[in-house]
Structures are given as C-alpha cells and as structure tokens.
Image (cartoon, helix red, strand yellow):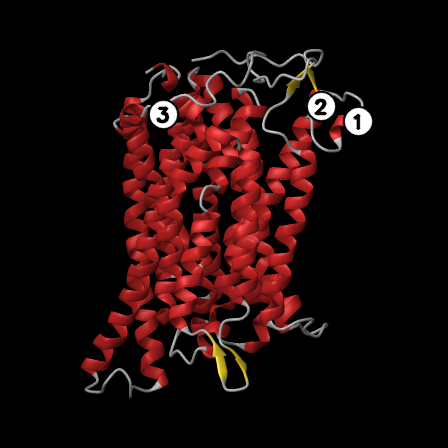
Amino acid sequence: MTQSVEPVDSVLQTPTSVTAERRPAANYTLWQWVVLGLICSLSMITYLDRVCFGVAAPSLASELNLRSVAELKWAFTAFAIAYAVFEIPTGWLGDRWGPRSMLIRIVIWWSICTALTGLIGLKIGSWTLGGLGTLVLLRFLFGAGEAGAFPNISRAIYNWFPSHKWEFAQGLVWMSGRLMGGITPLIWALLVTGTTWSPPVVNWRGAFLLFGVLGVVWCVLFRLFFTDHPRSANGEPVHPVSGQSAGSHAHGAVPWKWLLTNRELLALCAAYSFVNYGWAFNITYLPAYLKERFPDPSSSTLIAIYTGAPLWVGAAGCVMGGYCVSWIDARLGNRRQSRCVVGMLAMLACAGWWGLASQADNLHLFCISVAMAAFCVDLTLGAAWATCQDIGRTHTAVAAAFMNTVGTLGAAFAGWVTGSLVERAIHQLAALSNVSSSSMSEELRHQGTLNGFHFVFLTYAAVYVLAAVCWFVVMRNTSENADPASR
C-alpha cells in the first residue's frame, strides 16, 4: 500500500479556474476545505432531491388517482435500476475525464428531471401532462442522470486527500447528505404543507421547481472553484500523497478482470447491496407508512421530524464511523481490517434494531428503532467507500461505481419487493374476508398494509445478518493490494 504522506504546502498552490487564476497562492489545507465544502453541498442536494420524492409520494399518488403509494413501486424501482445501469460507465468517465466535468453534467441532468417532476399530472385545459407511465420514465431518466455522483465524489476525495483522511472526508460527505435528507421532510412541511405557526409557501409542484433551480446554482459555483487536482507551483496537477504528477494513469486501461474477480471487492459489494436493501425504506415508504399507522393529525410536525430521523441520526453515524475505525486501528494496527470489524458489529446491531422495530407498538419506539438501525448502517459508510478507494486506487471511481451499482440493485429490489409484499398482504386479507381487494373496506386495507410491512421489517433484519457475514468475508480476504493499474 502506498504510504500516506502529508502534502507540503510549498509544493502545492490553489486550483486553477476561471477565478482562481487571478487569486494569489493560498494554503493547500484551506483548499482541501473548499473542495470538501463543495462536495458536501453536492451530497446535500442529492439527498434533498431523492428524499423529497418519497415525501411527495402521497401527493403524486392522489394526483394520479392511485389507490395507495404502493402503486408507485415501479417509479421507485425505475430510478434505482437506471442508477445501477449507468453507475459504472459514469464512474469510468470520471476516472478518464476527471470528476469536475462529470459532476457538472450529472447535477444539470438531475436538476432538470427534478423540475419536470413537478409537471406530472398537471392539467392544462383538457390536456394532462403525463400519468404514471410518464412518471416511471422520468424517474428512470432521473436515475440515469444522477448515476455516478458518489463514485465521482470518491474520485475527487482520492485526488485531493491523503489516504489516512479518506474515512474522515467520506464521513463528512455522507453526513451532509444524511442531514439534508433528514431535514427534507421538515423543509417540505414548511414549504408545501405548512405548520401550526406558518402557512405553506408553494405547492408541491413549485417545490420541485425550486429544488431543480438549486442544483443549477451549485453547478455555477462548482465550475468556478473546483479543479480535478491540486496544482504544483508550475501548474502541473499532483497527487496529495506523493506530490508526483496526477496525470500518469488518467487514461490507463481499467483492469476489469482484476476488479470483477477481486473477492474482497465482491464481498464488499454484496454487503453494500444488503445495506441498501434495508435502508431504502427510509426514503421511499417510511413517510407513507407513518401516516398509515399513526394518522393523528395533531402530530403532523412530530411525524415530519420522525420521518427524517433515520437520516439526521444516521448523519452522526457517518462521522463516528471514521473515529471508530481509527480507534480500532490503534489497537489492531491494520486499518483495512479495522473497517471490517466496524462493519460486522454495526450490521449485527442493525439487525437487532429492525427486529425491535417489527415488534414496536407505538410511534416513539418504532421511530427510535428505525433511526438507530440507520445509525448503525451509516457507521459503515466511510469504511465501505474508503475500502473501495484502497482497492481501486487510480481507478477509484470505477471500483466505487461497481460497489454502488450492486448496492443500488439491492435498493431497486427492495423497492419492488416491499410494494409487492404489502400488496400481497392486502390481497390475502381480502381473500380471507371473502371480498375483492378493490371493494374491501378502508379498515381492512389498513390492516392488510400493516400486516405486509410487519413481514417486510423481518426481512430487513435478516439481510443485515447477511451483511455482517459479508463484512467477515471482506476481512478474511483483505490484503495490502497494489495499485490495480499495475495488474
């Protein structure tokens, strides 16, 4: 493994961009914080746009005359499928062309899709702008556009930070996204539904347009203040670890066979898939489930807070995960195996919390259990993405994209399976009651929905046990891998 060496400020200067060329040389560490601020804000916008769709799902279902949010399962699934399909190609382009151009393209694309979501079902005279099929197509395009965001963020971290800071940087990136995702339901409540102390500002369509514009503003700032690599005094791009030229492997052939047969990476991908399978509930079905099970309108603000709890509680886990890895590393003396220990313990704890959530009989215990499960998941994020950077090295974005692709397939499968299990439970209860599912009472439909989710929660507990097993396999196969570019 390449040794971690702090970059020397005298060797490095500020990035070169439209505005930076006119700016005097600044401290390299300061520019690391600028880069970190930019990619953390990108993570926040990513989660804002993802989570707002789940929060808006009841409004969309009503606008499209659907019987329940479960009928939006293909909209949830289409996003995840497209995200998975285009993840590796976009990661490869990021390694080849640099994260700057790719991230700008990604954010512009998904911002347009976000704004267009607000037009679904809009009636103009006798015309209706799209139905469920159009929404599914738009969500597919959304996923295709957003694919590669986090692999390219990982490449930016690899380019700008030494290896012993990877977990810290990844932790802050994911913390930022989780925090924004956590407060998105509250932002939505303030903007769209209003609260007991403030009226709504815009309708749900206007909120999607506003979020789309926010992404475009970010692109302008990113274009001005970010470059793919720190620069040496003579303007050459350099890597922060060695201080040597960063462009030597920029166009090297990707060692596909080595990456796709690496047992450590394959086990890590499987673990990440199981992680996403359970976690996807937090940004898809959770808002509708809470309204279904705890419909008391007097607690709407509390419901909004609890809806975002898995993300803002998980945000603390993103940061603490890096410290946990460092604490264990100080005792084991092996950073890569320390990441695996954190992964195994966190996944087992997560399974326990989902088991408790399946038995919870009140709002507070259920939401606390789900939030703590998310906290355990997020303890492992920095470790997982840093392990990808260790494996991929100069092909970091490709390795990270591979992991995220498999993980996204887990989320896609979960979105479809969760909706299908709930629908099946409703149909089974209708059959037992000798009525058709289309004519069953609201009370029966309500009970069938809760029965379906109870079984779903048990499947989440099971997959997190499997995730712990996968982390054990990663530890058994961990090695001090050389740069795959030499393979």
Q: Quadrant of the C terminus?
A: top left
Q: Is residue 78 above or below residue 223?
A: below
> Which secondary structure, mark 3?
loop
Location of residue 349 (image quadrant) = top left
* Category of crowding for the residue at label 2, using alpha-carbon neighbours closer than 10 angstroms: few (below 14), some (14–19), many (at least 20): many
* Category of crowding for the residue at label 3, using alpha-carbon neighbours closer than 10 angstroms: few (below 14), some (14–19), many (at least 20): many
Q: Is residue 383 visible?
A: yes
Q: Amino acid at mark 2?
A: Thr
What separation in Å lies between label 3 and label 2 (alpha carbons)?
Answer: 30 Å
Q: Which residue is mark 3?
A: 254
Mark on residue 23?
1
Of pointers 1 and 2, the one earlier in the residue sequence: 2
Name the residue located 58 percent from the left edge and 70 percent from the top edge.
205
Name the residue located 45 percent from the left edge and 73 percent from the top edge.
130
All told, the count of numbered labels is 3
**Residue 1 image offset from top left, x and y in percent:** 42, 13
What separation in Å lies between label 1 and label 2 (alpha carbons)?
Answer: 8 Å
Determine whether label 1 and label 2 are within 8 Å by CB.
yes
Mark on residue 14?
2
Of pointers 3 and 2, the one earlier in the residue sequence: 2
Q: Amino acid at mark 1?
A: Arg
Q: Is residue 308 visible?
A: no
**Residue 166 image offset from top left, x and y in percent:** 52, 26
> Which secondary structure, mark 1?
loop
**Residue 71 image offset from top left, x and y in percent:** 35, 71
* Category of crowding for the residue at label 1, using alpha-carbon neighbours closer than 10 angstroms: few (below 14), some (14–19), many (at least 20): few
**Residue 474 image offset from top left, x and y in percent:** 31, 28
What separation in Å lies between label 1 and label 3 (alpha carbons)?
Answer: 37 Å
